[in-house]
Image: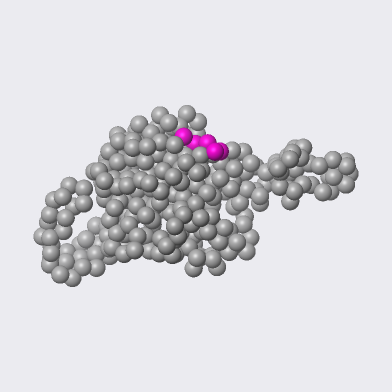
Amino acid sequence: MATHAPPASPGARFIDPKVLARVGSLELAARFVVEGFINGLHKAPYLGVSIDFAEHRGYMPGDDIRRVDWRLFARTDRFYVKQFEADTNTNFSVLFDVSKSMSFGSHELTKLDYGRFLAACLSYLSTKQRDRVGIVTFDDDIVERVPPSAKHFEVSLHTLDRMTAGRPGALGPPLYKATEFFKRPSIVAIVSDFYEEPEEVFDAVKPLRFAGNDVIMFHVLDPAEVDFPYDDSVSFQDIETGRKVPVVPDKLRDQYRQLVQDHIEALTKLANQNRIDYHFMNTRVPLDHALFRYLAMRHKLTKGR
């Protein structure tokens, strides 16, 4: 299925996941990506500082002086700060699949590594928009949880930095359990390879949506999982079950590729039916594509408040 990615920003060359893999600090990588992405845009219509004006409030120590209304100061001789609709804090949480299949990678990055950078960048971007950030990691159960908080960005990064993919996974039980964590409507980004039948995926995801959350699905696959570039006859092993299957690639390649595309199309269709944002991510794709999509959705949510 052809996907129409947004045009890359001028800073996209700095957002190549292969480059990020050489950066030692996850926080530094996230800042590097987000700041480069934002600076690369000619205009940032989706950022909090550019969203519709709402009201004034008195200036307080620590406020950005760039947001002082100097015309109002000239009339009143008092400092007032412009507030915008995006200043309303939102809870943003990443639900991160750390099942064993996420450890696969045919090039410099595994799906886990790519998702790690993706989650760090989305979290950092959310903190810049004054949202509270948190993270939940899961395989066939909840592994770790950091509740959304304005002070939890560093904790979330630490969780991302030390997580590993080691056990088989299942979407249903942990996502159903995670629904209990969100007592108020939140933005929930699910990062996973969604290795289940499309109907089973949405049976797992829908309770989060029905609870009033805005759900974004980031479907992360390695290019080898999409293109099946193998030539030699060999036994392929299921990462999670250990089961081996002998395969003749030339006879299977076209059928395999069609199955993958059918899977993506089915997920896209079900997401549209359930008003859930779904984005397919190839681990070779620069991260500005994901950031652009998130900003566009964030803008849509803010305008709807």
Provide the residue span drawn in magenta.
Answer: 147-151
Residue 187 shows in the view? no
In this view, the residue in front, 213 or 77, is: 77
Q: Is residue 150 magenta?
A: yes
Identify the residue at the far front of this view: 24
Residue 299 lies left or right of residue 221; in this view the side is right
Residue 101 lies left or right of residue 76; in this view the side is left
Residue at x-position 42% and y-position 62%: 22
Residue 260 lies in what quarter of the image? bottom left
Residue at x-position 70% and y-position 43%: 62
Question: Majority secondary structure of the magenta segment?
Answer: strand
Give how far across and how far down residue 251 sits, in percent. 14, 67
Give how far across and how far down residue 35 sits, in percent. 57, 58
Identify the residue at the far left of this view: 246
Residue at x-position 50% and y-position 34%: 185
Residue at x-position 21% and y-position 48%: 240
State the quadrant of the N terminus.
bottom left
In the image, residue 16 above or below residue 116: below
Residue 73 lies in what quarter of the image? top right
Give how far across and how far down residue 107 sits, in percent. 31, 64
Give how far across and how far down residue 275 sits, in percent. 44, 43
Q: Is residue 141 magenta?
A: no
Residue 51 shows in the view? yes
